[in-house]
Image: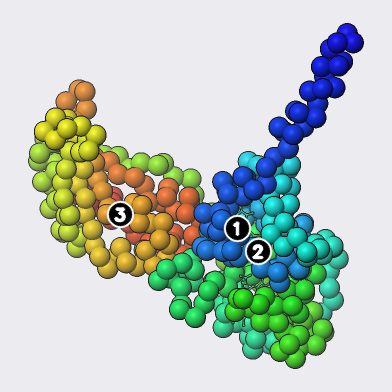
Amino acid sequence: MRLALLILLLALPLAGALAAPDGARLFREHCSACHGFDGQGGMGLPLSLPDFLAVADDAYLTRTIRHGRPGRLMPAFRELGDSQVQAIVGFIRGLQPGIPAPPSNDEPVAGDARRGADLYRKHCQRCHGADGWGGRGTGVTFSRPRDFPVMPPALNNPGFQAAASDRFIRRTLLHGRRGTPMPSFRERGLSEQDVDDIVRYVRQLGRAPGSWRPPAEQPPVLMFDSPYSLAQTVANIKRAVVGNNFRTVRVQPLETGLRPPGEESPGQYVIFFCNFEFANRALGLDPRVGLFLPCQITVLKTADGGVKVMSMNPKFMSRIYNNRELDEACDEMHDLYLSIMEEATL
Ligand code: HEC
Ligand code: HEC
């Protein structure tokens, strides 16, 4: 009994050390790909700027991680435990250890939304969009206007609205963010009342009709049975690709690179095809599309001698991208895959 207690007492601090989530590791695992190794920014906004950490309270950071920004790349992290989210927030705070966190305070600020609307049109619209949709594109490579180091975030976004308190928005407007295009409106000569009026209007943007909805559930793969032989089906697909204004890049065994040349299964082929105008447009919206280019359709002989035609489902991909602008391109690509596969198996 006593021995058990002793072991327990000895083991406790050790277990505690093992169990405490490591904020740096979690940040690098879940956030760095977009926000940079040390939060300096990339596809996601910079998180290490002194002017950001001086105005962002812990509730804002925590709620942003939980809600994400639906349709704006920033994912919602629902699978992380509370202590893990706290550890990530602690890591972000540690990027500017000299700057104390402002208090979290959800009390509303009082202002006149109608006056705020006029001020918004005059001072904010050119960057954050007429109804708060934010800048276009992801902010990386050629989707970003050259003079913009980061894209203006969407202010009508349900995730932003749920995360940001009135006080946070107020502080952001008064303070601005040096190192980004976001100016300080105190320095621009707006009064505190002007700023509060704008805050009330920014709140209304979140209630605008037609705000973003997640795309419907989708199967990951599109699949058709072909009544033709494997060779005939491949020929049909090549014909349908051209008929849809795309061009075939190459046809190769599915197992290319996995087996020595000449030993690949003769019953499985991939047809790669492309349309450069379309590819450039999609890459401009989100460079991650590059992982799935050129377009490809797989043709397989099944064990019972049938032939199947399949592709990934672009509408399924668009849920993963979380990029509202890309959804339209994915819908277009989805219809293209369907039309090629339907034509080839008719
Ligand atoms: C010249 C372009 C520009 C103008 C004008 C501008 N912003 Fe910004 N704003 C930005 C950028 C870029 C960011 C992101 C800054 C960053 O990287 O931290 C931003 C960030 C913000 C944020 C923080 C949101 C978030 O998700 O972090 C709020 C709120 C905001 N702006 C509101 C406004 C309002 C309201 C106005 C008008 C009074 C305004 N902005 C004017 C470019 C602009
Ligand atoms: C796939 C890319 C991506 C990943 C992964 C990602 N973010 Fe973001 N994040 C973004 C983008 C893009 C925005 C700006 C939203 C907008 O454009 O409206 C953003 C915004 C934010 C903001 C608001 C910043 C501001 O200036 O107000 C915070 C805080 C944030 N992310 C934290 C995190 C944390 C913490 C993680 C990891 C747990 C994470 N993000 C993972 C892309 C990402």
Name the quadrant of the C terminus.
Answer: top left
Q: Quadrant of residue 171?
A: bottom right
Query: Is residue 226 in sight in this rendering?
Result: no
Whether residue 244 sits left or right of residue 140 in the image: it is left
Among the two numbered marks 1 and 2 on one chain, the one whose residue lies closer to the N terminus? 1
Of the two numbered discs 1 and 3 in the rendering, the one whose residue sits closer to the viewer = 1
Q: Are marks 1 and 2 in contact (CB under 8 Å)?
A: yes
Numbered mark located on residue 48 in the image: 2
Within 8 Å: ligand 2 and the Cβ of disc 1? no
Separation (CA) of disc 1 from disc 2? 7 Å
Helix, strand, or loop for circle 1?
loop
> Dot 1 corresponds to which residue?
38
Where is residue 345? Give x, y as percent.
18, 43
Q: Nearer the viewer, residue 292 or 16?
A: 16
Where is residue 59? Give x, y as percent.
77, 57
Of the two numbered discs 2 and 3 in the rendering, the one whose residue sits closer to the viewer = 2
Where is residue 113? Give x, y as percent.
75, 80
Within 10 Å of disc 1 (Cα), the crowding (few <14, some 14-19, many 20+) is some
Residue reaching furthest to the bottom: 189
> Dot 3 corresponds to which residue?
293
Separation (CA) of disc 1 from disc 3? 30 Å
What residue type is disc 3 on?
Answer: Leu
Picture residue at 60% right of the left edge, 58% below the top: 38
Residue reaching furthest to the right: 2
Whether residue 136 sits left or right of residue 49 in the image: it is left
What residue type is disc 2 on?
Answer: Ser
Among the two numbered marks 2 and 3 on one chain, the one whose residue lies closer to the N terminus? 2
Q: Quadrant of residue 201?
A: bottom right
Separation (CA) of disc 2 from disc 3? 34 Å
Helix, strand, or loop for circle 2?
loop
Q: Nearer the viewer, residue 295 or 330?
A: 295
Q: Can you say whether 259 is above or below 192 in the image?
A: above
